[in-house]
Amino acid sequence: EGPRLQVIYEVDTALSSLFHGSIHTEAALWTSKNDLEAISTDKQWIMNGAEPFCKNAGLSVEKARSGRNSFLLPWAESYALNYELKNLAPGQLYEASMWRLGGDNDAYLVAAAKNAEAFYAQSKGFLEKDKQGWEKLVLTIKVPDNFKEDKLNIYLWNHGGKPAWFDDFEISRYK
């Protein structure tokens, strides 16, 4: 036998056209976006139109990708967002995204069922980076065929020791 050749490729996901935009070729059935700017009159909720989107906990005006507000997760094991994705059924497919600044790769976008053994997923790295250094995290959520619950919580988690800011949440349903 002749010599073996091993090749290792490194793909710059921020520059590669393969990693830009949605991973789906079909149009979304619905999309919801929130830039964290609409706050309820009692200051307890971040709003999505007339509906509460999530609790107003961890909001910061220190840094933002758009508008004034972002979530700040300042230390290890800090959490924010806790958006409730309701009326789930087995086989449904969602894609959630949020932009992150800082936190290295220890700050995540997470989706979990009340019983984490039934469903748990977290973002893995980022798919693109803008000129200001914000990284787009994307999380694909496929509801398992044997899923018995009807909702998931989508939240932000900083597992590392460096501060992380998050802004511009988006979720789409594809199936």
Image: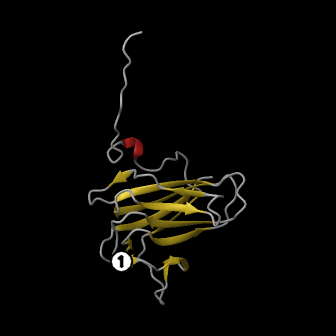
The one nearer the camera, 6 or 166, is: 6
* 26 sits left or right of 97 in the view: right
Q: Amino acid at mark 1?
A: Ser
Quarter the N terminus occupies = top left
Residue at the spot 47% in from the left edge and 89% down from the top edge: 41
**Where does residue 75 sit, x and y in percent of width and height?**
37, 71
State the colouring used for the structure image.
secondary structure
Residue sticking out furthest to the top? 1
* 123 sits left or right of 87 in the view: left
**Where does residue 105 sit, x and y in percent of width and height?**
38, 56
Residue at the spot 27% in from the left edge and 60% down from the top edge: 132
Q: Quadrant of residue 133?
A: bottom left
The one nearer the camera, 146 or 29, is: 146
**Where does residue 91 sit, x and y in percent of width and height?**
67, 52
Near mark 1 (Cα within 10 A), the count class, few <14, some 14-19 or many ≥20, is: some
Instruction: Determine which residue is flagged by label 1.
Output: 60
**Is disc 1 placed on a helix, strand or loop?**
strand
Residue at the spot 70% in from the left edge and 57% down from the top edge: 147
**Where does residue 68 sit, x and y in percent of width and height?**
33, 76
Q: How many marks are shown on the rendered structure?
A: 1
* 89 sits left or right of 62 in the view: right
- Where is 148 relative to 8, above or below? below
Residue sticking out furthest to the bottom? 42
The one nearer the camera, 124 or 87, is: 124
- Where is 33 relative to 51, above or below? above
Residue at the spot 44% in from the left edge and 69% down from the top edge: 77
